Amino acid sequence: MTEDELEKAAVDAIRSAAERLGVDPFRLARFLSHGRMADYLQALGRTQGEIDGRETTGLSGSYLDFLHEETRHRDRQPDKANGGDA
């Protein structure tokens, strides 16, 4: 896989995830940057006995904070269906 193909695959993955989550892809990419995506994937890959409750609570809390902020951000945007310029 070339660098360009890797970049396209990463962009497609973020866009697809953002669409399914109903969030802005740029904001999702920023949220997952600086190793945070790896933190979530590592936590998902652990068995029940390997999971540190404090770590998962922290990851869950930061993800819920992100979703809450996204909801507030989306609610502040003008509604295109009602003639707004979002």
Image (cartoon, helix red, strand yellow):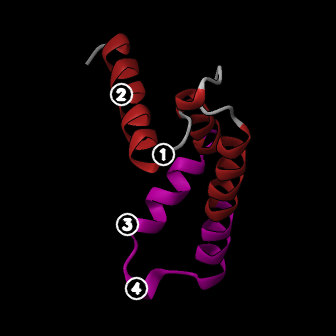
Q: Which residue is most to the front?
A: 82
Tell me, yes or no, whether the highlighted magenta stretch contains residue 42.
yes
Q: Which residue is most to the bottom?
A: 49
Secondary structure predominantly adopted by residues drawn in magenta: helix
> In the figure, residue 49 lies in which quadrant?
bottom left
Q: Nearer the viewer, mark 2 or mark 1?
A: 1
Q: How packed is label 3: few (under 14 Cα within 10 Å), some, or many (20 or more)?
A: few
> In the figure, residue 41 lies in which quadrant?
bottom left
Give, as a three-letter code, the residue at label 1.
Answer: Gly
Q: Residue at x 44, y 35 (%)?
A: 14
Residue 25 relative to residue 33: left or right: left
Residue pointed to by mark 3: 45
Residue pointed to by mark 4: 48
Q: Nearer the viewer, mark 4 or mark 2?
A: 2
Q: Nearer the viewer, mark 4 or mark 1?
A: 1
Nearest to N terminus: mark 4 or mark 1:
1
Residue pointed to by mark 2: 12
Nearest to N terminus: mark 1 or mark 3:
1
Q: Nearer the viewer, residue 53 or 72?
A: 72
